[in-house]
Amino acid sequence: MDKLTKKQKYFAHKKELDAIRDDITLKRWKILSKAYKLGKQIWGFGFTRIRLSEDMDIPISTVLRCLSLDKCNPKTWKLIKAKKISAFKVAQICQSKNITYQDEIVEMVIKDELSTTQISSLKVRSLKDVNKERQRLACENGYSRKSSAYSNFENWIGRGRLYLLMSKNNLPKDKLPVIKEHLLNLNEMIARYTK
């Protein structure tokens, strides 16, 4: 068996584990969600996820991750059912990210094929952050197409040139030293990059 075949078999095992993890996440969610709602009806607002974790003898991290699927919107559920994204990844998104931008984050995870590690590193507090994080990950991990990397690099240079044509009088005077410091730092980075 050659190295390429072994590699394919190796990553096939990951797909098997992903399918198992996804199935377990959905099954746990169905049970825990029902149990949590019942617990609230029985004990009221004093009933917590910690109590559910203790009563069901499941780690709190698992309870929090699974119950986060309650925050899924219908569009995300359709994507889970169509196997476009795993329930495990969606649970991670709903647990740790701003669900206001759930559609945008889910779309980014699908399009860029983000791993669970990459999902946990996302810092999304606004819609603007979604694109910024997409750029950050693309720069860290490489673009899927070199032409996209080149095109984005060119756009960034073009926007930078336009800003440098702006009069300093159009900027707050108290922010000029900060901008100068950032530009000097950027100049050093450009010098290193162009060597």
Image: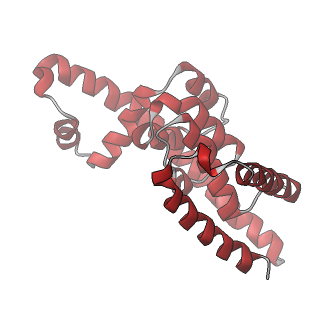
Give percent across and percent down for residue 143: 77, 57
Residue 163 vs residue 142, the one in the foreground: 163
Give percent across and percent down for residue 178: 50, 60
Look at the image and tell me in which quarter the C terminus lies.
bottom right
Q: Residue 79: tell me if it is visible.
A: yes
Which residue extends farthest bottom?
A: 195
Q: Which residue is depicted at the point 75% across and 53% down?
A: 156
Which residue extends farthest top?
A: 41
Give percent across and percent down for residue 67: 36, 33
Q: Residue 120: tell me if it is visible.
A: no
Look at the image and tell me in which quarter the N terminus lies.
bottom right
Left or right, residue 64 beside residue 85: left
Residue 81 vs residue 175, the one in the foreground: 175
Q: Is residue 146 above or below residue 65?
A: below
Which residue extends farthest right?
A: 147
Q: Which residue is depicted at the point 18% across and 16% down?
A: 41
Q: Is residue 37 above or below residue 151?
A: above
